[in-house]
Image (cartoon, coloured by chain):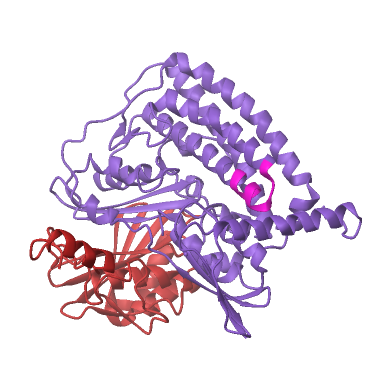
Chain colours: A purple, B red
């Protein structure tokens, strides 16, 4: 008999509301019903009541982490409508802000994943390494989050020339720390046991569900909007798209950790470009937006963000559609969580790095008794931590072979 | 697949039931009639091997313009397919049965703009609160900007009314 175990809607395993109803037979998950919409704020309609220049401030509040990615996709949509190109210096400044955002987002997720598995050392390390990135963002943009950096036609402010050595110093430190962290994670037998073969989302399922970002790349689905639909300076920057092939939670960790190195590489190149030019235009003036439509795409840390705008020639968009990557990625849990245990379910749903504010609960039902149970965030994390402890003991007692 | 090849194959397959346009080298548009909507999406996704991204719609006086985005990543362009679902009862066949990833976006378009997707496996509202009235579609152009949707009142509010008096009529029905 199938039991239903609800996780959520508030604080399921992450920091925002979402409701997952797991259908379980014993410990095994046999079905899932996902309910989103708990943080629905009507951003699209709000946006249609703001002027073209006010919208970036609104859309950067869609998500605290992607507060550069959403404005980036929005301004690119308007620039697509206008058919304009922004000055080169502004293009590099946009790339620097966006890649700094990717660094702090990936570090934040790795820390949370460590916390869910009972590895609070990983949590504390990564969040410690993340702080200097936020400090640099503050020095460069004026804010740790909600940077208000991008505008239609360019960026709002230039990086002070004297800040560039500080940014380079932070990148050098972070590169060493990220290498240490990556090696520690990739060498740990308990992390291997907890994440390898767990929550597998293969290539064909990534395509069917429209998975995006690290979730897709972990399954070998070779997509990255920065390379496939290059905008601004990205076609002048050299970087690799990190691909794995198994699509499990382990590969999702690997993709994000290795992408950090690529982001560091991109920022270094962009900094060198703006250091060499010293000064230059950082924006073009946009006086009016004609009637038409535009599509803006940017590869946010969680995957590709798409904004669609329609203008009737007035000073506000008549339609603004926002598609955050989590909207596609959370749906993939329909497949990846099936067959897993309840202790792994939280980790799998968290592995897509879901942004519920962008998208928007979890419950269990026992199919044999029909019993319904609600798990709190603490209970779910406790289940996951207990499993890690059990594996750790088995490995230390030699009952379990080390995977490599 | 090469852009010109894609345009040619779509034109060959659907003939006069589609109009193909190009706004820039990275943006290709295909305007389709309702009856071939699912076949067109199926053809682009499964035979032309495009990636499915998402959908959107624009509410107009006479109907709702529904569009889906299919990027061709290796060739660096976006193909958008569009159709028009006429009012007063905008309806379209669901593409969710050929592209699983379209399930949620069709549910969203239905609950926001009242576009009924026929044969959708599960056309429940995806975003709105349970307290929202069933026949209220908030993004429709017929909904006025100052519209205040009716809210469900719980026992606490009833009790507050007893203590503080009822709120002004029409503000909080």
Percent across and percent down for residue A359 are 41, 58
- Residue A362 or residue A47, whichever sits in front: A362
Residue beneath the point at 84% across and 54% down: A393
* The residue stretch that appears in magenta: A111-120
Q: Is residue A93 above or below residue B151?
A: above
Q: Is residue B44 left or right of residue A289?
A: right
Q: Is residue A336 left or right of residue A10?
A: right
- Indicate the position of residue A73 as horizontal and vertical percent values: 36, 46
Q: Position of residue B112 (x, y in %)?
A: 27, 68
Q: Residue furthest left?
A: B169
Q: Residue at x 15, y 79 (%)?
A: B88
- Please say whether residue A119 is one of the residues in the magenta stretch: yes
Magenta stretch: helix, strand or loop mostly: helix
Viewer can see residue A402: no
Q: How many marks?
A: 0
Quarter occupied by residue A22: bottom right
Residue nearest the viewer, comparing B29 with B132: B132
Above or below residue A144? Residue B39 is below
Residue A390: image location, x then y, percent: 79, 58
Tell me if I can see residue B143 in this picture.
yes
Outermost residue, right direction? A398
> Is residue A104 rendered magenta in the image?
no
Residue pictured at 49% horizontal, 26% vertical:
A135
């Amino acid at each position: 008999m199938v039991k239903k175990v609800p996780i959520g809607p508030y604080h399921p395993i992450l920091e925002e509301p979402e409701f997952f109803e797991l259908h379980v037979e014993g410990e095994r998950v046999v079905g899932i019903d996902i309910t989103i919409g708990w943080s629905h704020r009507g951003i699209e309609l709000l946006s249609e009541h703001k002027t073209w220049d006010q919208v970036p401030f609104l859309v950067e509040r869609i998500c605290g982490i992607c507060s550069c990615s959403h404005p980036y996709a929005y301004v690119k949509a308007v620039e697509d409508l206008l058919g304009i190109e922004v000055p080169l210096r502004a293009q590099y400044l946009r790339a620097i802000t966006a890649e700094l955002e990717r660094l702090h987002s990936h570090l934040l997720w790795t820390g949370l994943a460590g916390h869910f598995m009972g590895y609070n050392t990983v949590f504390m390390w990564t969040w410690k390494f993340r702080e200097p990135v936020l400090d640099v963002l503050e020095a460069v943009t004026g804010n740790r989050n909600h940077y208000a950096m991008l505008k239609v036609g360019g960026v709002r402010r230039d990086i002070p020339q004297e800040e560039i050595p500080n940014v380079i110093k932070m990148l050098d430190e972070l590169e060493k720390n990220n290498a240490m962290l990556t090696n520690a994670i990739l060498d740990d037998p308990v992390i291997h046991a907890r994440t390898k073969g767990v929550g597998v989302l293969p290539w064909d399922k990534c395509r069917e569900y429209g998975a995006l970002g690290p979730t897709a790349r972990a399954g070998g689905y070779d997509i990255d909007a920065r390379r496939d639909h290059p905008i601004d300076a990205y076609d002048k920057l050299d970087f690799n798209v990190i691909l794995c092939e198994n699509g499990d939670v382990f590969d999702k960790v690997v993709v994000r950790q290795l992408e950090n190195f690529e982001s560091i590489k991109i920022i270094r190149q962009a900094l060198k470009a703006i250091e060499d030019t010293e000064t230059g235009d950082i924006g073009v003036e946009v006086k009016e937006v004609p009637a038409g439509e535009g599509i803006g795409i940017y590869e946010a840390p969680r995957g590709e963000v798409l904004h669609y705008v329609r203008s009737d020639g007035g000073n506000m968009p008549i339609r603004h559609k926002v598609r955050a990557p989590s909207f596609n990625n959370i749906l993939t849990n329909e497949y990846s969580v099936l067959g897993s245990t309840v202790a792994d379910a939280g980790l799998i749903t968290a592995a897509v790095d879901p942004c519920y504010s962008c998208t928007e609960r979890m419950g269990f039902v026992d199919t044999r008794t029909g019993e319904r149970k609600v798990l709190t965030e603490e209970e779910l994390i406790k289940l996951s931590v207990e499993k890690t402890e059990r594996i750790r003991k088995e490995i230390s007692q030699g009952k379990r072979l080390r995977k490599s | 697949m090469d852009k010109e090849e894609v345009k040619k194959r779509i034109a060959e397959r659907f003939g006069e039931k589609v109009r193909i346009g190009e706004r820039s080298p990275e943006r290709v548009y295909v305007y389709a009639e309702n009856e071939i909507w699912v076949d067109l999406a199926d053809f682009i996704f499964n035979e032309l091997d495009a990636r499915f991204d998402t959908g959107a719609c624009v509410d107009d006086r006479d109907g709702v313009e529904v569009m889906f985005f299919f990027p061709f990543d290796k060739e660096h362009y976006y193909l958008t397919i569009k159709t028009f679902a006429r009012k007063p009862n905008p309806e379209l066949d669901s593409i969710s049965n050929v592209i699983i990833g379209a399930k949620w976006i069709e549910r969203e378009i239905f609950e926001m703009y009242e576009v009924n997707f026929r044969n959708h496996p599960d056309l429940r509202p995806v975003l709105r609160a349970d307290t929202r009235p069933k026949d209220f579609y908030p993004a429709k152009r017929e909904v006025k900007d100052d519209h205040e949707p009716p809210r469900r009142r719980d026992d606490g509010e009833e009790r507050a009314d007893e203590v503080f008096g009822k709120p002004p009529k029409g503000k909080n029905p």
